[in-house]
Image (spheres, rainbow, N blue to C red):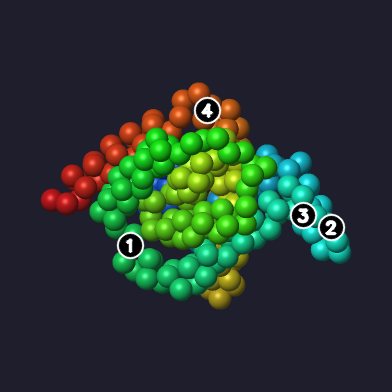
Amino acid sequence: MSEWLNVILLALTQGLTEFLPVSSSAHLILLPLIMHTPDQGLVFDISLHIGTLLAVLYYFRVKIKWLIIGFFKSFKPKTKMGVHSKLAWSLIIGSLPIAVGGMLLHSTIENFARSPLVIGYASILFGLLLYIAERIGSQARSLRSFTLKNALFIGCMQVMALIPGTSRSGITLTGGLFLGFNRKTAATFSFLLSIPAILMAGTYASTQLVNASIHMHWYDFMIGISVSAISAFCCIHLFLKLINKIGLLPFVIYRIILGTVLIFIFQS
């Protein structure tokens, strides 16, 4: 496989799986193993983070503007916290657990949890959990009823996404459904919560880059940003448009099949 085709395939995989409940990290670990291609390295990883971040920022640009306004309004004395103020603080509070968990558990996860078997079991386990959440959740609540306690609960759930195969969007969707939010609301909060998570992951990767002497392949870098951004934007749009029609069962089935195949191949 040519290097450019490999770069495009990896960026496309990142863009399509970052916001679906199927685990982008699992697919990016597995793809080089399946295709027998070398790891593209830290610089390319950063380009993928930038691409998916640009996609979610642009897609929710209007909502983000109101969240910023709401955040600063919350500091005005004797001002009742409105919907956007509450949601802005919810995103901050919901991001604290993954920040702490990432600092404490990153090295352990990198050393012991990036195997295909871990991905396989996590894919099945958290896929079933997503199915249960969708089945038992009332799906009656909207974004207007979001509370800071809800945000903290979903944020704590997000820490489990450090395990490859869990899926950050999948586990936060699961948390939202367990709390009784409808699919689109749970997905919207999950996507907004991805902004600080991706920023933190990209910042951490960038600090590693500063401390390393790495040659920059600008073509790969720009292709990574462009392809991951466009594919992620399309993925967000289609997922939010179709989620109430198709539900989450197709993703659960995919996860179970993926996990079963991985366990069958790598257990022997």
Q: For the residue labelled by badge 1, is the local secondary structure a helix, a strand or a loop?
A: loop
Give the x, y percent position of residue 227: 57, 41
Give the x, y percent position of residue 51: 61, 48
Foreground: disc 3 or disc 4: 3
Give the x, y percent position of residue 220: 55, 50
Residue 147 visible in the current orientation: yes
Q: Sequence order check: which comes first, mark 4 or mark 2? A: 2
The quarter of the image holding the N terminus is top left
Q: What residue does disc 3 label?
A: 81
Which residue appears at 31% of the width and 48% of the height? 125
Which residue appears at 36% of the width and 40% of the height? 132
Q: Distance between the residues labelled 1 and 2?
A: 47 Å
Q: What residue does disc 1 label?
A: 113
Between 218 and 169, the one nearer to me in the picture: 169
Which residue appears at 25% of the width and 53% of the height? 117
Give the x, y percent position of residue 160: 42, 58
Q: Sequence order check: which comes first, mark 1 or mark 4? A: 1
As shown in the figure, which amino acid type bears the numbered disc 4? Asn
Q: For the residue labelled by badge 3, is the local secondary structure a helix, a strand or a loop?
A: loop
Q: For the residue labelled by badge 4, is the local secondary structure a helix, a strand or a loop?
A: helix
Q: What residue does disc 4 label?
A: 244
Residue 173 visible in the current orientation: no
Q: Distance between the residues labelled 1 and 3?
A: 41 Å
Q: Which mark is residue 79?
A: 2
